[in-house]
Amino acid sequence: MANPNPNDEVAMKIKALLEEGQPRFTEECCIYRVPDDIRKHNEEAYTPKVVSIGPFNRGNQILLNMEGQKRLYCRKFIERSETKNLESFVSCVQELEAEVRGCYSDDIKLSEEEHVMVILVDCCFILQFLHELFFMLTRGDPLFLPRRLAGSICNDLFLLENQVPFFVLEKLHNLAFPSTLSSGIHSHVSLLLPAVAMLPAKTIVGDNLEQILTDVGRVAHFTDLSRKLLLRSSQLFQPSASGCSREGKLMHIYSATELKELGVKFEVNKNSKCLLDLELSGHTLRIPFTKVVDTTEVLLRNLVAFEQCHCIHEAYLTDYILLLDFLINTDSDVDLLIKEGIIENWLGDSNAVAQMFNGLGVNILSPDFNNKYSLLLESLNAFCASCCVKKIATFKRDYCNTPWKTVASITAIFLLILTIIQTVFSILQVVH
């Protein structure tokens, strides 16, 4: 009998190994681990402080204190529902479990039963929390949460790694309150209305909120909701607007203080409340007002991380961050923008604001760039490249950078003019 070929045995093992391979990113994938090269620059910005949502942060010891409150909220939501049947909610999540699993970029190391429990409790907690946030419970109610804690939960619910798919929330909401389906309001709008109340930043322009939420369309999760509302409120980058081409080029420009020296004026863009709407008119750069607070960096970092992972070829917020990174290099640039009313600094230190914007652009990929910003950068560079502009800027820098130098320069110019006039008259007298 022939000895078995050892190569055949190895080949069989490799074949079995290859058959175990599964795609890491499915078409449904929308919830991601933040890439390490981005995360390492500020890990706390992507890590929940109070509450764990979904499988990524499950087991974090710091977040275990909220587990009891989550279960209480889950129970109250089911009791408050029109259905009041736990089995119906369990069955609903069981039917969605495989689809939910495919929404996460990492392989979920939970059994189907464990995963169903995590998703059900977390989703019902969120739905009840939105209800309580909307109706503002008072002290003495068993569901009452201190305002500071509620604020921290709101921030945690917008972190990219701390998400559940929105379609599960919608299914459970519709199961709990089927009467809302006949109210004439789209089901996702009736759920999004209270969700907007916990937005960490006001990103909506206009009073017709219901219509805005209808126009937003399908939402993947709360991080996606915040981004879509931001784009929807922009005059420049509405997803349905024409001219939002991604064929532009990212090019370097001078910092804000350097542009100021070259004659560029800075003004607040009062025509828009969306921070993305930068405009250049002549040599005046109009930038929307923004208030920089403790949570600003966390919100922007998670939105940029989502764009980097999910929609890098529609990364309009990333474009804004890269442009601001050029404009702001030092605290002097921040001070200039504060003076012009463009930035309101709640961090106290201008250098902290500069470091924030500089850090947001680190290790960010930009395979393409929106055409509107590209034309703005090109026009700025063309203005700054003018010989006349450069000569005037050099004169201002060298001879008018202090009040005394300015007075001395004007005096010298005046004396030079008088000397020239006197010389001309002297020449004319000799000629005559």
Image (cartoon, helix red, strand yellow):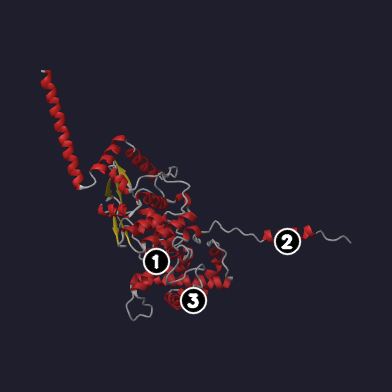
* Distance between mark 1 and mark 3 Cα atoms: 31 Å
Mark seen at residue 322: none
Left or right position of 19 against 179: right
Task: Report x, y in % for residue 163.
Answer: 47, 65
Q: Give the quadrant of the N terminus.
A: bottom right
Between 383 and 138, which is closer to the camera in this rendering? Answer: 383
Depicted 392 relative to depicted 358: above or below: above
Q: Residue at horizontal 40%, vertical 70%?
A: 153
First-in-chain label (2 vs 1): 2
Give percent across and percent down for residue 106.
55, 63
At 40% from the left and 58% from the top, the residue drawn is: 300
SS label for mark 1: helix
Residue 286 in view here: yes
Q: Amino acid at mark 2?
A: Lys
Residue identified by numbered label 2: 13
User: Which label belongs to residue 155?
Assistant: 1
Residue type for callout 3: Asn
Which residue appears farthest toward the right when viewing the image? 1
SS category of the residue bearing label 2: helix
Q: Amino acid at mark 1?
A: Asn
Find disc 3 in the rendering and name its residue: 85
Q: Are marks 1 and 3 in contact (CB under 8 Å)?
A: no
Towards the viewer: 270 or 143: 270
Quarter occupied by the C terminus: top left
Circle 3: element type = loop
**Mark 1 against mark 3, which lies toward the viewer?**
1
**Exactly how many numbered labels are in the figure?**
3
Choose between 387 and 299: the one closer to the eye. 387
Residue 34, position in %: x, y?
Answer: 49, 60
User: For the residue carrying disc 3, how many other residues have a C-alpha within 10 Å: few (<14), some (14-19), or many (20+)?
Assistant: few
Q: How far apart in space, not on screen, are marks 2 and 1 (Cα)?
A: 48 Å
Q: Which percent across, then down, holds residue 9?
A: 77, 60
